[in-house]
Amino acid sequence: DTEVTQTPKHLVMGMTNKKSLKCEQHMGHRAMYWYKQKAKKPPELMFVYSYEKLSINESVPSRFSPECPNSSLLNLHLHALQPEDSALYLCASSQDWVQAGDEQYFGPGTRLTVT
Amino acid sequence: AQKVTQAQTEISVVEKEDVTLDCVYETRDTTYYLFWYKQPPSGELVFLIRRNSFDEQNEISGRYSWNFQKSTSSFNFTITASQVVDSAVYFCALSEAGDDKIIFGKGTRLHILP
């Protein structure tokens, strides 16, 4: 089973709202990732968790706050977003950190619209 | 610095034609990994293949085949007898051993016309 699930599938939020994106995998993977993808662009890495610890923050604004409650779950807390944050947010996981060259498995994404 | 170039922004072919998607990479490392991902309109990136720099063997999986040539720093992807379901954006990607992220190319949007 190479499935990564994400909820919700779609999210519309105002600039003053607080919401969370959720990601789950049951493949026993130890690395999990958040990506942001704008239309007609490749995914851009936001955060990497390795063994439940934040390993990489690609200078993401603090209005995005990641959390890894356990090795299977990854959350992205959203607060005071801007319209330009509207995008597809993809979660991924890999057996080990990308340094090992492991492939990443992606979830279906959450399409976020900030109004 | 590592870099992935997919020069073909968009390709359209008629169903059953063969099509090759080009990928050229740059890296200074001797150990690195190459990937292809498919992104259909639904949005999910689907992993297709992973190759490490020491394995130049070409690979075939059904109608899909990959040609890895270190001499030209290329990792091209061919779909034989294309089908409408192959319509998607295809990303080539690179990671270097010891590095902390995958570098994606800009993607090639493939349209298979019925």
Image (cartoon, rainbow, N blue to C red):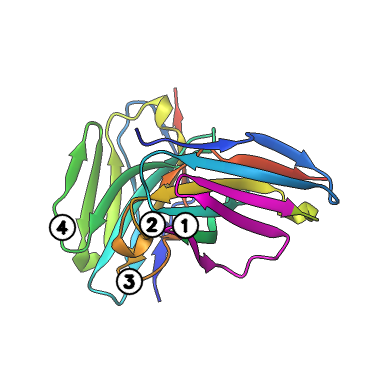
* Labels 4 and 3 touching (C-beta < 8 A): no
Chain label for disc 3:
B
- Looking at numbered disc 2 in the image, what kind of residue is underneath it? Ala
| Residue drawn at 65 percent across, 40 percent down | A111
The residue that mark 4 highlights is: B56
Residue A61, above or below A68: below
Looking at the rendered structure, which numbered label has been put on residue A52? 1
| Residue drawn at 24 percent across, 47 percent down | B66
Measure the alpha-carbon separation of dots 2 and 1.
Answer: 25 Å
Asked if badge 4 and badge 1 are on a common chain, one would say no
Classify 10 Å Cα crowding around label 1: few (below 14), some (14-19), many (20 and above).
Answer: some
Disc 2 on helix, strand or loop?
strand
**Left or right placement of residue B96 versus residue A78 in this view:** left
Q: Mark 3 or mark 4, which is nearer the start of the sequence?
A: 4
Q: Which residues are magenta?
A: A50-78
Please state which of residues B53 and B64 is positioned toward the viewer in this rendering. B53
The residue that mark 3 highlights is: B98
| Residue drawn at 30 percent across, 69 percent down | B97
Classify 10 Å Cα crowding around label 4: few (below 14), some (14-19), many (20 and above).
Answer: few
Please state which of residues A91 and B72 is positioned toward the viewer in this rendering. A91
- Looking at numbered disc 1 in the image, what kind of residue is underneath it? Glu
Q: Is the magenta region chiefly helix, strand or loop?
A: strand
